[in-house]
């Protein structure tokens, strides 16, 4: 019997050594950690949803025994991508509407709407994505044909940027809109005493407020549909810009159930009930949901000539766009947001809108600070105003695909000289040393690879223009990757919990089929996501 004790001891020791001390080991990978020194590794370990160790596989395999092992086969692994400016819920709702992105003419729009109406036979017809700037006739359409096709059923079709729409007469009647009617921060187009159906900025809201609210079932389906598509392109966090406070509980409940795994940074819309809600209860923070910001709209979009410019549009004399609210409103909003310690995020496209908001921000921030107030888009900024970003640590939150989408027609709106300082992402990045990147989807495509391509190559998906658009403002690949990961997290005050593959952070990561840091520039839009993980758990795998 005595001779058996050594054997039993060895068996017990062996069993003890095989006790699991990690949930996941990723090995045989090129891991871009995106840490402060842009370190690479070939393996990392995950435990309880967070990164436990990062380094060399030989060392990690000696220290950890994981329940699951992923052999990445030499593929590149990156932190989960973060979209710093999107409309996640709106995108999900839009998946159930008429899809008009890429339609080449008004007749093509009408064909799509007619086809949609045949399988959705009752209720409002809602569509989104048309863009007259890519049509042969670049003028806004008229509702006459829409009225003939749908004399009774209300129709509202939004332009690609969401800042203009066309409604048929049935919808205008429901909204009570009359020829010649005026509205602050918007336009109801009237020609020869008749409504054309075109509504710009605040005018669109007169109609949308009459559309029945989506049911809880539709709302949940929209969030989950959006999540599915976003996981497929490697997004693990999205900033949803401009939601009502009522959505907070819906999102939180879906996340608590485990159905909605997408992490969300929610900006509440510029409405009194939203201020009352957040000021009363304070910031809302869970691992999956962060609500501490407000989204304000200073002006409209360049494509619909709603962006507020310092000088008239080059293609429309005596027209400089408009602010969507009075300067006094923006001053009041900034003052109360600052007083309660929340983040202010303002949509500003035109150089006049940017100047107004930058000066209001400066009055409240009073120089260097860590409040991380953001200007969303910052597309056209007067050169003399750029320094206000750095002087007051104001964060330019930009969407690189806007530059490559707009470049075809932006010179007509702005003129060549003014365009030179537009979409100046490199200059803006230099102000604070970092810049968050997003897409503004569904205005642009949800794919982060398009963001990376546009930021670094400054070309559209056709490869135009040769040599890139205003390449002096292109970002390096390292800067672009940081902008889609750790800098986007920083814009949300979340850089200590996500945005890089470092010990203690959430194990959100993606595996791509090609290395975006090395692949030929023209191939970047074709790079595909193989797998997406949140908390070390797979949420997407390419079939």
Image (cartoon, helix red, strand yellow):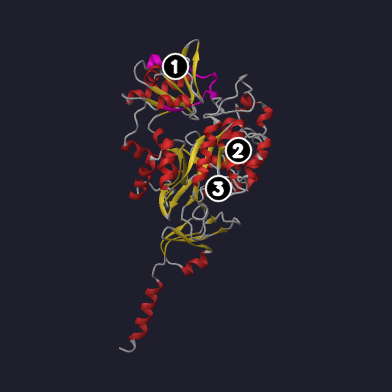
Label 2 SS:
helix
Residue 295 forms part of the magenta stretch = no
CA separation, marks 1 and 3?
46 Å
**In the rendered image, which residue does mark 2 sit on?**
358
In the rendering, at what x and y percent does residue 164 appear? 49, 25
Apparent side of residue 207 relative to residue 399 in the rendered image (left or right):
left
Q: Compare residues 99 and 522 and report the one nearer the observer.
A: 99
Give me the disc on residue 429.
none
| Pointer 1 or 2: first along the chain | 1
In the rendering, at what x and y percent does residue 529 appear? 48, 46
Give me the disc on residue 143.
1
Q: Which residues are magenta?
A: 127-149
Q: Residue at x 42, y 50 (%)?
A: 288
Residue 96 lies in quadrant = top left
Q: Is residue 39 above or below residue 393?
A: below
CA separation, marks 3 and 2?
14 Å
């Amino acid at each position: 019997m005595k001779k058996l004790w050594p054997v039993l001891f060895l068996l017990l020791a062996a069993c003890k050594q095989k006790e699991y001390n990690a949930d996941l080991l990723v090995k045989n990978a090129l891991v871009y950690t995106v840490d402060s020194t842009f370190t690479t590794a070939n393996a990392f370990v995950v435990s309880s949803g967070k990164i436990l160790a990062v380094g060399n596989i030989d060392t990690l395999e000696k220290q950890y025994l994981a329940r699951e092992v992923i052999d990445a086969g030499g593929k590149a692994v990156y932190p989960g991508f973060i979209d710093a400016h999107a409309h996640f819920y709106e995108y999900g709702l839009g998946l159930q509407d008429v899809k008009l992105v890429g339609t080449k003419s008004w007749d093509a729009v009408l064909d799509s709407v007619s086809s949609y109406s045949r399988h959705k036979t009752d209720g409002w017809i809602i569509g989104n994505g048309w863009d007259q700037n890519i049509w042969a006739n670049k003028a806004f359409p008229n509702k006459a044909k829409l009225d003939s096709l749908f004399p009774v059923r209300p129709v509202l079709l939004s332009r690609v940027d969401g800042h203009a729409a066309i409604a048929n007469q049935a919808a205008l009647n429901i909204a009570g809109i009359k020829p010649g009617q005026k509205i602050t921060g918007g336009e109801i187009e009237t020609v020869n005493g008749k409504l054309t159906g075109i509504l710009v900025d605040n005018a669109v809201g007169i109609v949308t407020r009459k559309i029945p609210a989506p049911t809880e079932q539709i709302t949940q389906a929209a969030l989950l549909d959006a999540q599915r598509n976003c996981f497929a392109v490697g997004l693990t966090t999205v900033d949803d810009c401009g939601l009502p406070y009522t959505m907070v509980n819906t999102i939180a409940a879906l996340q608590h159930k485990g159905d909605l795994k997408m992490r969300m940074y929610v900006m509440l819309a510029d409405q009194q009930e939203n201020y009352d809600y957040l000021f009363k209860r304070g910031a809302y923070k869970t691992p999956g949901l962060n609500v501490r910001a407000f989204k304000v709209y200073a002006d409209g979009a360049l494509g619909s000539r709603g962006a507020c410019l310092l000088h008239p549009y080059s293609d429309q004399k005596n027209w400089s766009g408009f602010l969507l609210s009075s300067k006094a409103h923006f001053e009041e909003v900034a003052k109360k947001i600052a007083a309660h310690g929340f983040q202010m995020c303002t949509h500003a496209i035109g150089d006049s809108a940017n100047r107004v908001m930058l000066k209001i921000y400066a009055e409240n921030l009073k120089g260097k600070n860590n409040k991380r107030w953001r200007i969303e888009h910052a597309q056209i900024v007067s050169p003399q105003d750029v320094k206000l970003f750095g002087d007051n640590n104001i964060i330019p939150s930009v969407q690189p695909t806007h530059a490559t989408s707009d470049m075809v027609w932006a010179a007509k709106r702005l003129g060549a000289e003014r365009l030179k300082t537009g979409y100046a992402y490199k200059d803006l990045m230099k102000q604070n040393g970092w810049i968050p990147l997003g897409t503004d989807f569904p205005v642009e495509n949800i794919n982060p690879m398009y963001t990376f391509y546009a930021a670094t190559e400054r070309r559209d998906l056709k490869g135009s223009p040769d040599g890139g658009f205003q390449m002096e403002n292109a970002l390096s690949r390292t800067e672009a990757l940081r902008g889609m990961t750790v800098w986007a997290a920083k814009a949300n005050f979340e850089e200590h919990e996500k945005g890089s593959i470092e010990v203690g952070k959430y194990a959100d990561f993606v595996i791509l089929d090609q290395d975006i840091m090395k692949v030929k520039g023209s191939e970047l839009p074709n790079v595909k996501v193989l797998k997406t993980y949140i908390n070390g758990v797979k949420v997407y795998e390419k079939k």
